Amino acid sequence: MKGPLHRRTLPAPSTPGSLSDRARAAYLGMALGDALGATVEFLTPREIAHQYGQHDQITGGGWLHLKPGAVTDDTTMALALGNALLDKGLDADAIAQAFDGWLRAKPVDCGNTVRRGIIHWRRTSETEVPLSEHDAGNGACMRVLPIALYLHGAEREALDAACRLQSHITHHNPLSDAGTLCVVECITAALDGADLDTLRDGPIARLVAEHPLFAYDNKRQENPSGYIVDTLRAVFQALTAQGDFRAVLVDVVNRGGDADTTGAIAGMIAGALYGFDELPQVWLARLDPRARELCEAQAEALIATAEVALA
Ligand code: MN
Ligand code: MN
């Protein structure tokens, strides 16, 4: 199998702390956060406390009436993006086509901005929606994980360009762009073994310096909306306040609001940061087996592709 393009040997998939272990944990972390948070999506913290005490088990239900362990658009759009990258590389048209196929397959949920962007592509063949001051939703950020794996080891400029390429199919907004790049940089650093302080003082601090709206260390962000600023403030607060994977996810989803999406984004970062062994076994056992299989296979394939692309 060792062609001239394979210069490094991949570590065994199960080695704790290895790149492939962290990549797999990032994917499963995203799916777990999505499945955990979907139950309480659009509830307020008070409503969650009233109904569940603390919501910390994967039980399905919620406004989408999900089966326990089912994932939503956050995870399935990421998988569609990942498939396009594996098939065609960084090709905006192939990615738009993958999103279109995803929408045609009648996903359990689809955000308004996402739907509008895909329909724009159907009508115009344009892979970029017009710049919008208003469409600063979290829909481009929630699906971005495959970019971090596919371009693992690339420079910041290349990451930025790839984030915009996939984002602008549906979301074209400076705050969405900045927040999405920051999440990719956090994942990238965590895949390389960076600790929480390094994420906080590096990519997160840089985002806040460039866009002070993202400052997260003042007022507690409860009930985060789908606005990228609210979403990431909740994610950063939970991530920096808690010291392990489970605590980060329980903290963020119990804030309510767009809880499946805060869960998915916190889960991809915390998964990469803490690794596979930190993922709660009881949650993994509940996760939809098909979603788990697709996540693990895609994580492995993307990391293997990154080795080739950067060799
Ligand atoms: Mn969702
Ligand atoms: Mn959501």
Image: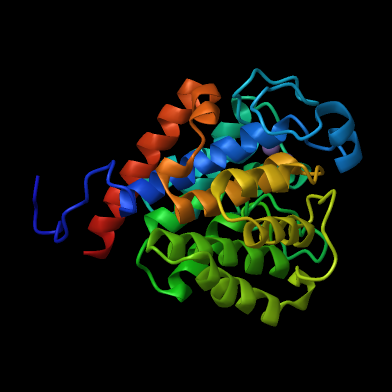
Q: Give the camera-side residue of 273 and 109.
A: 273
Residue in the picture at 83% in, 60% down: 220
Q: How is the image coloured?
A: rainbow
Q: Quadrant where the C terminus lies?
A: bottom left
Q: Quadrant where the N terminus lies?
A: top left
Q: Position of residue 186 (x, y in %)?
A: 52, 64
Q: Position of residue 232 (x, y in %)?
A: 70, 59
Q: Give the camera-side residue of 266 and 97.
A: 266
145 to 215, vertically: above or below: above
Residue 12, quarter of picture:
top left
Residue in the picture at 55% in, 47% down: 245
Residue in the picture at 61% in, 61% down: 180
Q: Give the camera-side residue of 115 and 216.
A: 216
Q: Residue farthest to the bottom?
A: 209
Question: Left or right: where does residue 89 sit relative to residue 164?
Answer: left
Q: Give the camera-side residue of 302 and 42.
A: 42
Residue in the picture at 68% in, 22% down: 60
- Examine the rendering and report whether any part of residue 90 can be seen: no
- Examine the rendering and report whether any part of residue 98 can be seen: yes
Residue 33, quarter of picture:
top right
74 to 219, vertically: above or below: above
Q: Position of residue 161 (x, y in %)?
A: 50, 68
Residue 131, quarter of picture:
bottom right
Question: Left or right: where does residue 224 sit relative to residue 108?
Answer: right
Q: Position of residue 263 (x, y in %)?
A: 65, 44
Question: Left or right: where does residue 88 sit relative to residue 288?
Answer: left
